[in-house]
Amino acid sequence: MKKNKKAFNKGSLITLLIIAAVLVLTVVLENTINANSLLFTVIRKSAVYSLVAVSMNLLNGFTGLFSLGQAGFMLLGAYTYAILTIPSDTRESIYYLFQGSSFNFSFVDLFSSVFGQQGAGKTVSLISGVLLAIICAGIVAAVFAYLIGLPVLRLKSDYLAIATLGFAEILRAIFQWDKLGKVTNGANALRGYPTFADFNITNANGQIVFRLASFVPLLIAGICIFIIVLLINSSYGRAFKAVRDDEISAEAMGISLAKHKSLSFCISSFFAGVGGALFAMFASTVQAKTFTSAMTYEILLIVVIGGIGSVSGSCIASFLYIACSEWWLRFLDNTQYIGGKQVPLLRNGFRMVVFSVIIMIVVLFFRKGIMGDKELPDLFNRLLNRKKKVTVKEGTENE
Amino acid sequence: MSNTILKINNLKVNYGGIEAVKGISFEVKEGEIVTLIGANGAGKSSTLRTIIGREKPSSGTIEFAGENIAGMDTTSIVKKGITLVPEGRKIFPDLTVEENLKIGAYMRKDNLSQDFERVYSLFPRLKERYWQAGGTLSGGEQQMLAVGRALMSKPKLIMMDEPSLGLAPIIVRGIFEIIEAVNKEGITVLLNEQNANMALKAADKAYVMETGRITMEGTGKELLENEQIKEAYLGKSKK
């Protein structure tokens, strides 16, 4: 028993080191190479997507509830975040079609009236305002999830998926409704709220001294994912897995199905809401029409490619997915000439063809996703054990 | 005389218009092994599912330790000290043996180390495999795990639905040894079995169910020697 625990710690240690290395590398790269490189867009977007993918995995992979409402909860989170942080003085110009917002309140303003608007006070009020708004975004999503869950969680598998998908579509329509314009700005975009770029440290003249715009989303998503991992390994996580594996047995053990399904749905939606807020910060404008069901499918694809039931799989897959769709395959969209001759097939849109083929190949060769239901620490442990066995064998041969 | 721990009175259960249990009454005394035998569709599983609260009775009472639990939700019934080993074992295949056992103690907040020891001493095989996923165990080991998992909740009454289903004869014998061992720990056992021969040998008291009614009752020995039972369930050929 002890031996096993030790090996477990080693694997997790390596994983933690890798995560730390990625964080440090991001900060270093951000401040040394061209900040407009697509790499940073990819890092920011994949940080956001990995959080949402992990939250979806918590529901689909660990509790066995097939929900497709992720975009809906992201929309709730994104709007909550934006509405709570747009500075009061710019609201008039953003809500110009509706003669100003009915909601003249901003967390950042609130904190800057406490901590001051200059220097350190400004930074503190920015950070605390943004964090509070992000948490509110999650809470709003979780409250909606609770209410939706009351009727919907009685459904199983495909029916649950259809119901949650419908909910997300309804939300999208409601948020574009003119009558709510004073709150949601109708079909127009919300903007002007703090984004990741606001976290770059500037000097008095407004010049950027130290860039943190890619580090911040990684850090926030990382902390959230860490919380989810802790939850999965707790007794609640075990109960979720029990509900997924066998409802009858789980109930016979005294696990209340309704309570645990609802809990998992709310927690998953909370983090989807936080993900939505981060997505708003990434995109710098919020518009209901971006949160389509296609967005949910993208996230579902990431979860499936990474491995249903693997947190690290979701994170790796989201980086690969975003990098492929936004960055590595870009060249396929540009017409190119070799020796005066146009290369066939390369034209706008060809990227998506190649991308789809790659996804098909991945799914064919990794039936259970890149990671299956294993986590990175498991993988390292297995590698370490294999090495040990090899050395032991060599040792006996030498004797 | 020992006390009655479970008393079923005129219990009726409906499934979408079909009356699966048509008014049965029986009782289980503390420390006994009681078995319900009968063919498929006799209403044995429905009875157990109703006791644990998965189905709501249409009428009748279920008294557990003097309290009517009919119509309560499963969680509170499990809390009161009843547990069910479901038909087909139904262990959690993706959780390890140890995690399966921990789930069994989900309702409890106290220290589990003693109970782990108890289960592992009853089933040393489980201790050897504590890190294995439940789904990789053999059928007999899975049944051990299912029983062990049920023991972890410190039940007063353990109900088993067809524990011998789909297992080889030699394993079935092992299962009945387990049942007797569990009973020796002071836990009352209510058993559903189609394997009437084994069940009657183990049971203190037995009830025969046919199409939703109890048609016969007696001690295990009495029923074993009953001509009708021999013909219908024990495979004695008519002469």
Image (cartoon, coloured by chain):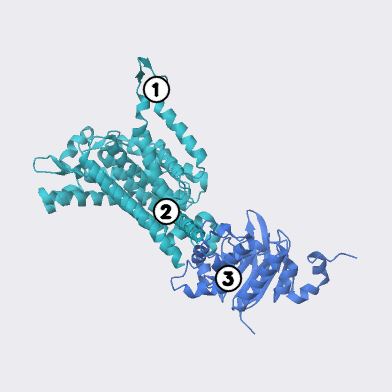
Chain colours: A cyan, B blue
Check residue A380 in the rendering and tell me which mark sits there, or answer none: 2
The chain holding disc 1 is: A
Q: Which residue is mark 3?
A: B124
Q: Is residue B202 above or below residue A188?
A: below
Judge whether residue A136 can be spotted in this image: no
Q: In the visual, does A321 lie left or right of B75?
A: left
Q: Is residue B161 above or below residue A30?
A: below
Measured as percent of width and height from the top left, residue A21 is found at 30, 49
The residues bearing labels 2 and 3 have C-alpha atoms spaced at a distance of 30 Å
Kind of residue at disc 2: Phe
The residues bearing labels 3 and 1 have C-alpha atoms spaced at a distance of 65 Å
Please tell me whether mark 3 sits on a helix, a strand or a loop. helix
Kind of residue at disc 3: Pro
Q: Which residue is mark 1?
A: A346
Kindly identify the residue that appears in the image at 61 percent across and 61 percent down.
B89
Q: In the visual, does A86 lie left or right of B41?
A: left
